[in-house]
Amino acid sequence: MQKFENGTWAVTTKPQVPGFHYYSLIVDGVSVADPASQTFFGCSRWSSAIEITEKGMDDFEVQDVPHGEVRTIYYFSKVDESWRPLIVYTPAGYNENRQKDYPVVYIQHGGGEDHRGWMEQGRTAQIMDNLIAAGKAVPMIVVSSNSNVQSRNGGMGGGYSWQGMQTFRSEMIDNIIPFVEKTYRVRKDRKSRAMCGLSMGGGQSFYIGLRDPEVFANVGVFSTGMFGGISGASNFDLETEVPGMLSDVKTFNKQFDVFFLSCGEQDPRIQYTRTIVQKMRDGGVDVHFNSYPGDHEWQVWRKSLHEFAQYLFK
């Protein structure tokens, strides 16, 4: 940055591609958020951000359509024995039509983020309002939870393995879903539940969603690194990680109404994702796949939710 005579500092960056961009100010070697800008929790810290609007993506913006509500509500977790937050989107008409029950999407954030990511950076409410108003998606509830949960018996909710998912699996199945089904007017059958997520949340959705077909019939996996492209991810064996996916593909396909994968075209994970999708298709797995311009970033994940939501509960 350049200092001017009046004491202010300024810089002009190169043009940025459309999407949501975190940024920081480095003052005497210390990286800090911009005090004159809105901040968001991402990258394991509070960060400033700037939005470059993308042409043709009006569904990411507030439009003149009926709007749902976004609420923060707390439930008690028996996993880490504390009160934990959920952010819940209910579609327009939920408060008025008290005889109607709704399907539910349980949506998961990535590493270094929390329950606020999908509702703030991800524009979930705007996407759902616009899709529902256009008749492209059915009215549904979306529940965003904080998967940074630690069991009192040890173990975190992350990790790219079935074993590493057990803490959050218990949180989701034994705590979050029962609380939502007790608190909101929701359908309680497997075909009316979906689980999806980005990056770390994509790994959680893959393992928990696909290995618990009695709970979920719809699964979305966005930009996960477990297939490769991140440190420690290699030699991913589909049959080992999801028994029956390839050896009994007919049963696997019958269990899931929607199985969707996505990734950014400039994401280091893209080629590994394309390779695993091809292995699935060669084995007869019914899987939707799409890629979008962008790296490991919110514009890709917004588009992933935008597409996934249009497949659901139909």
Image (tube, rainbow, N blue to C red):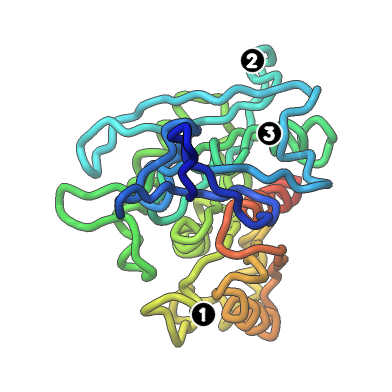
CB atoms of marks 2 and 1 within 8 Å: no
Sequence order check: which comes first, mark 3 or mark 1? 3
Spot occupied by residue 155 in the image (x, y as percentages of width and height):
22, 58
Q: Residue at x 56, y 83 (%)?
A: 247
Disc 2 to disc 3, C-alpha distance? 23 Å
Q: Nearer the viewer, mark 3 or mark 1?
A: 3
Q: Residue at x 48, y 73 (%)?
A: 242
Question: Mark number for residue 98?
Answer: 2
Question: Mark number for residue 238?
Answer: 1
**Residue 4 visible:** yes
The one of 40 and 290 positioned closer to us in this rendering: 40
The one of 25 and 207 positioned closer to us in this rendering: 25
Circle 1: element type: helix
Q: Residue at x 35, y 39 (%)?
A: 175
Identify the amino acid type marked 2.
Arg
Spot occupied by residue 200 in the image (x, y as percentages of width and height):
44, 60
Residue wearing tag 3: 126
Q: Is residue 211 above or below residue 53?
A: below
Q: Is residue 63 above or below residue 234?
A: above
On screen, residue 88 versus residue 82, left or right, reads right
On screen, residue 76 versus residue 273, left or right, reads left
Disc 2 to disc 1, C-alpha distance? 43 Å
Circle 2: element type: loop
Circle 3: element type: helix
Q: Residues within 10 Å of mark 1 (few under 14, many from 20)?
A: some
Q: Is residue 124 above or below residue 90?
A: below
Q: Residues within 10 Å of mark 2 (few under 14, many from 20)?
A: few
Quarter where residue 77 is shown: top left
Q: Residue at x 71, y 64 (%)?
A: 293
Identify the amino acid type marked 3.
Gln
Spot occupied by residue 137 in the image (x, y as percentages of width and height):
76, 40
